[in-house]
Amino acid sequence: MDFPFSEERFWLPVHTLPRCEKKFIRFCNSYKITSYLPLKIKVRTKGRGTVRTELPMFPGYAFAWVDPIERNKLAQTNTIVNFIALNRDQEASLIETLESVRILECMQENEEIVVSPEIQPGSEVKVSAGPLRGLNGLVTKRKGIHRIVVNVEMISRSISMELDSADVELEH
């Protein structure tokens, strides 16, 4: 997919309702509006076979290349929370990012990719995997790209542990 640039049209990040990303893309396709939904492949075994599912890489977000009239048409869908306004410099940066995301998306046939939120020290997280699953904690520091140190308070005691960033999710 190409990510064109023009003075009359602009790339627009769209914040969708939960689980409405693909519905939004179908709406765009029905009106021939150029759009992009990065997908990640999830493969899991079920019974004797494997199930391959394509899920939004960035849940709740899709991208559309629109002019002002098409933007108004998109606003009529029941799938959008809001549009994220960008200036032209931000749009140029978005296009570069989308091109990189597209390359990563294509690499999934040979490599597993993991998408996780950027977790900074001070972030409140919930452990989503492992024996401490379900506990809340506070990130105290990052150790490299994939490892974080989380402080979990239990019964008036504090435990610090090193976790993989994929094993936690940000608390809202």
Image (tube, helix red, strand yellow):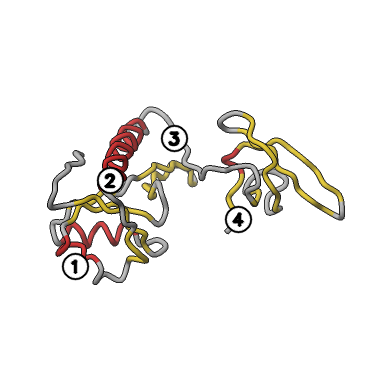
Q: Secondary structure at mark 2?
A: helix
Q: Secondary structure at mark 1?
A: helix
Rounded to the nearest whole Å, what is the CA distance between mark 2 and mark 1? 21 Å
Q: Which residue is mark 1?
A: 73
Rendering coords of residue 40 (x, y %):
39, 43
Rendering coords of residue 87 (x, y %):
28, 50
Residues marked 3 and 1 touching at CB (< 8 Å): no
Instruction: Tell me the amino acid under the disc marked 4.
Output: Glu
The answer to whether 163 appears left or right of 82 in the picture is right
Q: Which residue is mark 3?
A: 113
Rounded to the nearest whole Å, what is the CA distance between mark 2 and mark 3? 25 Å
Q: Which residue is mark 4?
A: 171
Rendering coords of residue 48 (x, y %):
47, 42
The answer to whether 108 appears left or right of 116 in the picture is left
Q: Residues within 10 Å of mark 4 (few under 14, many from 20)?
A: few
Number of marks in picture: 4
Residues marked 2 and 3 touching at CB (< 8 Å): no
N-term-proximal mark, 4 vs 3:
3
